[in-house]
Amino acid sequence: MFIYDSVLKKKVEFIPIKENEVKIYVCGPTVYDDAHLGHARSAIAFDLLRRVFIAMDYRVTFVKNFTDIDDKIINKMKESGQSLEELTSFYIKRYKDEMQALHVSDADIEPKATETVSEIVTFIEEMVKKEVAYVTSDSVYFDTSKDKQYLSLSHRLIDDEASLARVSQNDEKKDQKDFALWKFTKADEPSYKASFGEGRPGWHIECSAMIEKHLATSGAYQIDIHAGGADLLFPHHENEAAQTRCKSGQELAKYWMHNGFVTISGEKMSKSLSNSFFLKDALALYDGEVLRFYLLSTHYRANFNFSEEDLLLSKKRLDKIYRLKKRVFDASVGEISATFKANILEALSDDLNISKALAVLDEMIANANEILDKNPKDKSLKISTKANLLWLESVLGIGLHNPYMYFQIGVSETEKNEITQLIEQRNNAKKEKDFAKADAIRSLLEEKHIQLMDTVNGTQWEKVN
RNA sequence: GGCGAUAUGGCCAAGCGGUAAGGCACGAGCCUGCAAAGCUCCGAUCCCCGGUUCAAAUCCGGGUGUCGCCUCCA
């Protein structure tokens, strides 16, 4: 397995801390608002990573957190009048439902910040004791000057005035680069008791504490892979790494992976630009699997420019998978082709080269179709093709629909009955060589976006866009 | 202002020094009553300029364009 390490900025061979095991931590969402396409892309990218490791027989422990205490959440509580619990449980549930629609597997552990407070407090206490953190009137800060390797992750120089001018000034901070580990709270805000004063955790500390609680090994590195969106590299991951390094003497992660952004009309979606395409809206328009396949089809590190046109084109490629699946649907389950499996894994183990993997798949599809055109009843081919498809679908997280149902998404039962009747009428017309009538029926269905296909197994239909 | 990424046929997109995968669209053909589906065939010298090399889309230098990070962000 080769992965691109975004700290080393090159592709490296993945060598696990412990043989055949891999521990992955992915930064999850802050649950104060709906998830958008960017969250989906990140989740899908690292869901693929996890599935590939599993397909390669690694024992995977996959952790994704929920940040459920934060300034933005508190602001939203004040706006909406909801309690922390009401607000965060609503968005957590929605996030999980949306991930399910996208076939993103649940993480093995899904810790919440609010469930990790005691570990966070202990973590900070130790840092204060080691004098890598200090207490001011409003917060406990991490002292970045104590970490000689600070900024080694993001390779950044932030001593220049222009950079610092963008950060709000605070005279109690020893250095403007220092960041809050704990914020002392006002009376009407959610807070937790701590020896250094009642308050709530800062954003960065929770991930360090969660990793230590749920995943950390005792060696040089706490986990194998830490992943997240490219915008998290600085300051979030830089700060996480610094805390853990100074507190435990260990490096947080052996490898760092970051996914590229989803842009719309060439611009990154962001809260401040309010150009987010929310998943609840996207999933109302498109099937979750179609959306997954589209977001999956570009390499995870490249930026992804979302367009409805491209999504519908991408669907055509997924359609081809399902059409072949229909052709082999009645076959029994058998052995997959060793060559096919090896070729797919070779592609995916090269830093998740999905384009190459899909090219291998398309070649397999074309080959199988060609043979089935010549001999529609080639039993052994049908068996191996079906096995190939089922295996691949588990690796890519697609193909969970029944292939006949897939082409009927968005068609009501009443409409289905209507279609069946019209097909019957058309077949009768065809028998009587009344092709004008048969074609009229086909045109009628086409107007309703129903495409007919006469096959050796009778007339089939698909819903088309 | 600092730092970084990227630029491949009409569109999406691989490529990681050895002579341009794949998908979609277009066109031609086979199949079909006609279609659809499927299959076959068909298109680029890789932003520009210089350099290294027997050999560069791939490495180096300099431009230009686009995007991003430096502030919440996946």
Image (cartoon, coloured by chain):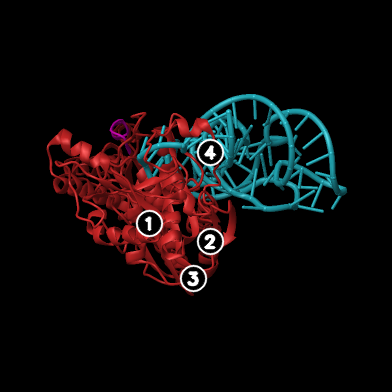
Chain colours: A red, B cyan
- Between the residue at mark 3 and the residue at mark 4, the CA separation in whole angstroms equals 35 Å
Task: Inspect this view and state whether residue A44 appears.
Answer: yes
In the image, residue A325 lies in the stretch drawn in magenta:
no
Residue beneath disc 2: A349
- Between the residue at mark 2 and the residue at mark 1, the CA separation in whole angstroms equals 16 Å
- Residue A397, labelled with which disc? 1
Give coordinates of residue A263: x percent, y percent.
Answer: 43, 35
| Disc nearer the start of the sequence (3/4) | 3
| Disc nearer the start of the sequence (2/1) | 2
| Disc nearer the start of the sequence (2/3) | 3
- Residue A17, labelled with which disc? 3
Nearer to us in this view, A132 or A349: A132
Amino acid at the residue labelled 1: Gly
A366 relative position to A64: left or right: right
| Disc nearer the start of the sequence (4/1) | 4
Q: How crowded is the residue under tag 2: few (<14 C-alpha within 10 Å), some, or many (20+)?
A: many
Which label sits in the foreground, 2 or 4?
A: 4
Do the numbered discs 3 and 4 sit on residues whose CB atoms are within 8 Å? no
Q: Chain of mark 3?
A: A
Q: Secondary structure at mark 3?
A: loop
Q: Chain of mark 2?
A: A
Residue beneath disc 4: A159
Question: Would you place residue B20 above or below residue A17 in this image?
Answer: above
Which label sits in the foreground, 4 or 1?
A: 4
Q: How crowded is the residue under tag 4: few (<14 C-alpha within 10 Å), some, or many (20+)?
A: few
Nearer to us in this view, A60 or A382: A60
Q: Which residues are magenta?
A: A444-450
Give coordinates of residue A56: x percent, y percent.
Answer: 47, 68
